[in-house]
Image (cartoon, coloured by chain):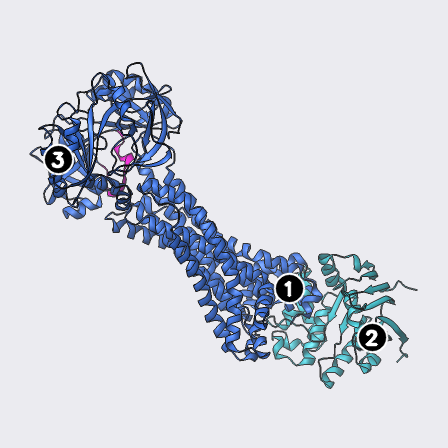
Chain colours: A blue, B cyan
Amino acid sequence: MSTLGRVVRAGAGRHRVQTVVIAMVVLIAVTSAVLGGSLLLASREPFDRAFGQQRGAHLTAQFDPTKATVAELTASAGAAGVSAAAGPFPTTQISAQEGNHRLPPMTVVGRSGPDGPVDQAKLTEGRWATAPGELVLAEDGRFQGPPIKLGTVWTLPEEPGSPTVTVVGIARSVSRTAEAWVTPAQVTAWTAGDGPTGYQMLYRLTTADTAAQVEAARAAVAAKVPAGALTGAVSWLVTRQDAVGQIVLLVPFLIAFGVLGVVMAVLIIGNVIAGAVSTGTRRIGILKALGFTPSQVVRAYLGQALIPAAAGAALGVVAGNLLTFPVLAETNRLYGTSDNGVAPWVDALVAGGALALVALTAWVAAARAGRLRSVDAIAVGRTPRPGRGQWASRLTGRIRLPRPMTLGLAHPFARPLRSAGIVAAIAFGVAAVTFAVGLGTSLGLVQEAEDLADVQIGALPPAMGGKPAAGSQPEAGNQAVAGPPRLTDPVAIVAAITAQAGTAGYVGQARTEVTVAGITGALTTVALTGTDGAHYYRMVSGTWLTGPGEIVVSTPFLTAAGKQVGDTVVLTDHGAGVTVRIVGEAFNTDDKGMQILTDIATLRAAEPDLLPETYFVTVRPGTDAEAYASALRTALQPYGAWAQPVDQETGELVIIIDALTALLSVMLVVVAGLGVLNVVVLETRERVHDLGVHKALGMTPRQTTAMVISSVVVTGLIGGAVGAAVGVVLQRTVLGAMGSSVGFTMPASIVDVYQPAELLLFGLGGLVIAVGGALLPAGWAAGTRTVTALRTE
Amino acid sequence: MTEPLIELRDVTRRYDDGPPALRELSLSVQPGEAVAILGPSGSGKSTLLNLIAGLDRPSTGTVTVDGVEVNRLGEAASARYRRARIGLVFQFFNLLDDLTVADNVMLPAQLAGMARGAAQRRATELLTALGVDRHASAYPGRLSGGERQRVAVARALMNRPALLLADEPTGALDTAAGEDVQRLLTELHADGQTIVLVTHDLALAERCATRTVQLRDGRVAADTMAPVR
């Protein structure tokens, strides 16, 4: 081995703590960068990528089987503007029951496989249905019920003989063409007497960028089949708007997490490597005195840093891939994408980038040390020169605390620059954790807004009382073509709700469309009735509805209409003008924030037959929502209404975000702790002779530990306080920016997530990090033999 | 005859594979004695001092000081033993540069839990007695070698130790300062302080010690009572 090699090996072996710190820091940094980078990639135009990956259907059309033959539908693939088509697939509607639990009705499509020229459904679990009695459930979040496991058996009480069906697979269709799939033969079997209730055709178009282009294609398809055969069609633009609307706020959140991971990686590597190399400055002086050239010194220290860094990077890539896998599974579920694992180039870029960063930082620090005169380099790293921080010693000496503690408290002031480094490391860790926790909490609140009700009540579909007329049922995912069934007797339903024990409050929702002067197109208006509408919306400003003639809207509406809270606007509903006042701004991302909320009485004159389609009930604390819904279901049955508990389980996304937050927090804390460890090891080594003197004068190991731990208390407290404050500012700034990037103002209830006690804990977290990082060197100092310490220069 | 203050019995100290620094050495020191340990480099003088101070432990044999079997003490107990019974004076003073002279002197007492006020009074008393009280607020870096060693002696005496151990106390001083420290040690001995000092300096031994112990290759080569002055 060359002299240089021996020096590198000896340096890495002699400074085991630093070698381990470098390896661990690079490991953690690479892990977080792989995770963060993958998250960034996964969040890049997710719907369009998913749509491309699955060859999504630009046009999903529903046909009346009594008016068009299979051959005619097949021929519709030749319509102008159509580049590929799949189908016809027979469709029907089923109402399943799992044990005693009735499930909401669902549209089922008969398809022999997930593949094809259009809408390649992605199986996420199990397999495709290959025989009668088997069903594949669509995983697109629309199924309202408890999570379904493979092998679940449903009974179909509405079908002749009450057959059963087993869930054999779960698949994802970004085009949302069905709620479930079975074999075509199964649809035929279920509809033996009447034939399928509909046929579905899926088309890809040569150009489908605008609604007009899709509409032209729809017209061309309609012309290819007998008149009246096309009963409904859904444009992919509608599906995209719906999908993007749902994740519009989640994307920036996830991007923020990704950026955090990558930025953390860059900063910690720079910080720790620079610290590690600068601790070797004295050794560099000795090497130079022995005849090493500056370039040899640089190469020696590059090697010393790169060996553990390479090991850390390799392990980090493995750990990053292992951690990314479940996160990608969740983003796939959320976005409908099919991203498989970490892209190899991400692994290569992150590992290579980390090593390059290590090399660059080590090179800069070593080159700087290499340029020092040997005598100066050797002098570096001794006990601080007298005069530095003596005022602090004098001051702390007067504090009524045990002397070892007051001695330690003064240490940071002897080397203010190094102490600033510790403060920065701790502040960075605390800020990042504060920021990550705040962001995660806010995201949880955004998600939670979707699930504030305990029980949902809707109308029983016609299928529950008998087969609907062919082609008349609502098409999968297309509420615009045929609206949901209406509740016919709202007075009786409200009476049943209020009579039911355990009811805390309810709200009824009716949907209609109005136009507003200055805004192009119709706007969805949710007309509310009931006792606690305010419960379901987070207010940004103004007040909630207090009566008719008032509306509550979101930021995008205000921006588009050029209005503000307090202004008056005229809604045109069925040709009648209704003057309303904007009394509040709510955080409501539905319909891209263009939804109008009002009291149902506001539209009474313009739309006398407007009735609630859905009721949401909040139950009293301690009431079992399942039992409540079951009891209410019986009471509602005579009125053609259906009650079911709203899935209150924490969303998987929230779980994954919480896990991500926890993971990033742990990594940041560990890294900050390693930063402290690195500096305190250096500090303790430099003070080892003084340590020997203290011990010779009677300082016990416990007192020594107390002194070393106390030496990081001040820096820990300052770092914690600064970090918590920066974290809060960062969370507010980023959250605000994220909201405005998608046109929303975040309500205070989502932004102000920190409680004073939490902030105190975050601040004290700096102390915990500092003490955690100092424990190892403190133990080392306590265990150092006095004679050895006294002999050390 | 009174109980010896220091009693070493068959003490051997071996480091790794090398020859023992001390070989089955036995030695007793009575209270009030001033013993100079002499000998060439490598004879085991500093090792002997370290064993008595509880800074090191013998490989075999026992070291008893003031009734305490030092060789059986753990790190914490030996620290408490040192601050209660031993005053240490080093060749290079070993004053802490970031503490004032007064703070240096008070340190052993404060480590023992003495309140700052009481420690301050005792430190002032010692600094005054040793003639360096005017430097109480100064930092050691500003003092001459002799003054620093006086401060070191004051610090060593802070807890009224039964035994003062001095390792080459004049080794880093010029002649005048060395003589100054010699006088100081003589005065302390005259006041009844038991002193064990390790030195190469025969003049120091002759002037300060009532007994000289010559070490060679880790053994006592000569143990001589000095003539009564």
Residue type highlighted by circle 1: Gly
The residue closer to the viewer here, A305 or A764, is A305
Left or right of residue A274, residue A450 in this image = left
Q: Which mark is residue B117?
A: 1
What is the chain identity of the residue bearing mark 1? Answer: B
Residue A399 tag number: none
Residue at mark 1 to residue at mark 3: CA–CA distance = 99 Å
Q: Provide the chain ID for the residue under circle 3.
A: A
Q: Toward the viewer: A219 or B54?
A: A219
Q: Secondary structure at mark 3?
A: helix
The segment highlighted magenta reads A530-544
Can you identify the residue that label 3 sits on? A221
Q: Up-down: is B27 above or below A740?
A: below
Write down the quadrant of residue A627 in the picture: top left
Residue beneath the point at 41% across and 45% down? A325
* Percent coordinates x, y for residue A367 in the rendering: 48, 74
Gap between marks 1 and 2 measured at Cα: 36 Å
Judging by the rendered image, the residue that carries numbered circle 2 is: B36
SS class, disc 1: helix
Amino acid type shown at disc 2: Ala
Name the residue: 27% across, 23% down: A185
On the same chain, marks 2 and 3? The answer is: no
Q: Inspect this view and state whether residue A384 appears.
A: no
